[in-house]
Image (cartoon, rainbow, N blue to C red):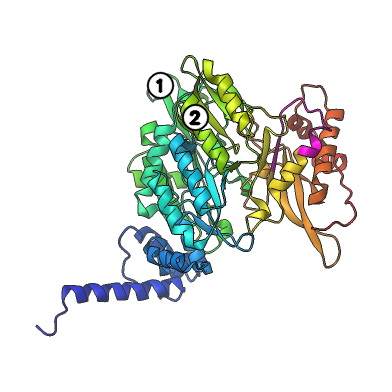
Amino acid sequence: MGSEFSIDQKRYLEGFATGVTAARAARGSLPAGSAASPSGPDAIHHQAQDRVTASGKKLNDQEKWKREQHPFDAYARLKQQAKDNAAPKPADNFRWRYYGLFYVAPAQTSYMCRLRIPNGILTSWQMAGLAYLADTLADGYAHVTTRANLQMREIAPKDAVQLLQGIESLGLWARGSGADNIRNVTGSATAGIDPQELIDTRAYARDWHFYILNERALFGLPRKFNVAFDGGGLIPTLEDTNDIAFQAVTIGDGHGVAPGVYFRLALGGITGHKDFARDTGVIVAPDEATEVADAIVRVFIEHGDRTDRNKARLKYVLDAFGFDKYLELVEDKLGRKLIRVPAEAAAPRPAQDRAAHLGVHPQQQAGMNWIGVRLATGHLTSVQMRGLAEIARSFGDGDLRLTVWQNLLISGVPDARVTDATAAIEALGLAITASPLRAGLIACTGASGCRFAAAHTKETAEAIAQYCEPRVPLDTPINIHLTGCHNSCAQHFISDIGLIGAKVAVSDEDSVEGFHIHVGGGFGVDAAIGTEVLRDVKQDDAPRVIERMLQTYLARRASPAETFLAFVRRQDAAALQQLFAYEQSPETVA
């Protein structure tokens, strides 16, 4: 009897042995074949890590941190750090991103919190609740992101846990919105109200969203992962910039499947790495989208790079395997073949309107409208958040719809209330119209709130707008995107004019903030990666450089109908570099 262990002792010893094995594997020192088979919801990740170490390679630091302690097993330490008002060490700064918290020092000695809002839709009372949290636990504002999401900033460590609790008390989430996880699920901004849509994406985005939240195996991927659902509506969803793009299409008779609306499957979008999602030839029944997405992600979990963070995205697995092999592995997970149809089986997608995210537009519901509200590169004060919530409640159907264009829509406004709703929006210092330049002006957080950024993007975007609007009589829409670093959160490669932050040398020892500039990017039917035409443009010079580029376009376009995109695409790179040549101004202070 004395030689036997009790159940509790056995569990302790099993846990101790597992911990030692995990720590050795994370250090890359575990001999091949010496580990017990991992089990539980994290097994798929541990097995992938073990294959790396067994092959003689070393895990990157983030993989080691995940293996040493899963972030969701460290909540007690997050609470203790909040109690101590303590900033996290690097490993915990990574772990807390699983909860949606990013410690962004030295840009700001505080946390940023990123939410999860499936399909970008929240209620008026949720927006009002977030305004209260912004005032009491953050710094009184929020930013709409390019994933139709919200970020709150300047959160003291002592307030971080209370903020997370407040967000969940509102029926919202931040879980998994950062680090190596599936990010906010985007969908058509006008889902369910768009007269031309093929399918309402809300149910499918929410189903996938809740599946992620309740399946721990989908947390801790080789790196971040993006999924989007486009329903064929007026407002572009930019689904082709995602790792998985579900694109609504209508399939007619004679193609071996029942005619109707399906999702066309495209994979591997990551425009920061100069690639769009590519069509697989596969169509997916809408109610099978979550199952198919799960299988795609699990193949990525097993085969994604866990040694080099720069190559740890789906695109690189697809490049290595080819689409056919990857889809065969997905079919193995599903236990069935995917449905393939020729490209011509799908009717053309309804046309997009690049201005439909602003202004008044009739809904599919008779007598109802959505109103697109312009925000200054996504910035919302808590006063504006409360005001918009009240407008949505009083004049609309109570929903606020965030878009990938860093603005929002108020839906369900009756014809008779549009004038009053518009007046209330303008009373908040906001507008429903914009100049051709401001309508497509996008900027990430930049150096004011992100430690990776090499320039102040939102401030420069505003400076460009103020300088160019009175000087350049634009008569066609133009997209100008400013991103602070190579993460390309503002997707500078897919805009008419894209600026990416850079340090610009002004002497052998000194540099100032600045940008490299690309032109000719596009999305949807115009999808293409922009071409670099200017390097090392100082931040202070950016407004006049953009003004010169726009003036050159107006003076040299083939006709008043020629867009900026068409103009630059009929020139080669050398000609564009000559047209837009930049002479650096005398040295300025950063």
User: Where residue 114 sits in the image (x, y, percent)?
Assistant: 51, 50
Q: Amino acid at mark 1?
A: Pro
Q: Amino acid at mark 2?
A: Ala
Q: Is residue 445 visible?
A: yes
User: Where residue 526 sits in the image (x, y, percent)?
Assistant: 65, 32
Screen quadrant of the N terminus? bottom left
Screen quadrant of the C terminus? bottom right
Residue 247 located within the stretch drawn in magenta: no
Which numbered mark, 2 or 1, is in the foreground of this view?
A: 2
**Secondary structure at numbered mark 1:** loop
Say which residue label 1 marks: 259
In this picture, residue 556 sits left or right of residue 369: right
Q: Residue furthest left?
A: 1
Query: Which image quadrant is residue 426 in?
Result: top right
In this picture, residue 118 sits left or right of residue 488: left
Which numbered marker is on residue 392?
2
Please provide the residue range marked out in magenta. 466-481
In this picture, residue 155 sits left or right of residue 477: left
Relative to 209, residue 189 above or below? above
Residue 471 located within the stretch drawn in magenta: yes
Q: Residue furthest bottom?
A: 2
User: Where residue 560 sits in the image (x, y, percent)?
Assistant: 80, 22
Which numbered marker is on residue 446?
none
- Give whichever of 20, 28 is nearer the camera: 20
Q: Is residue 352 visible?
A: no
Q: Earlier in the sequence, mark 2 or mark 1?
A: 1
Measuring 64% from the left and 44% from the top, which residue is drawn there?
491
Q: How many marks do you count on the picture?
A: 2
User: Where residue 580 sits in the image (x, y, percent)?
Assistant: 85, 41
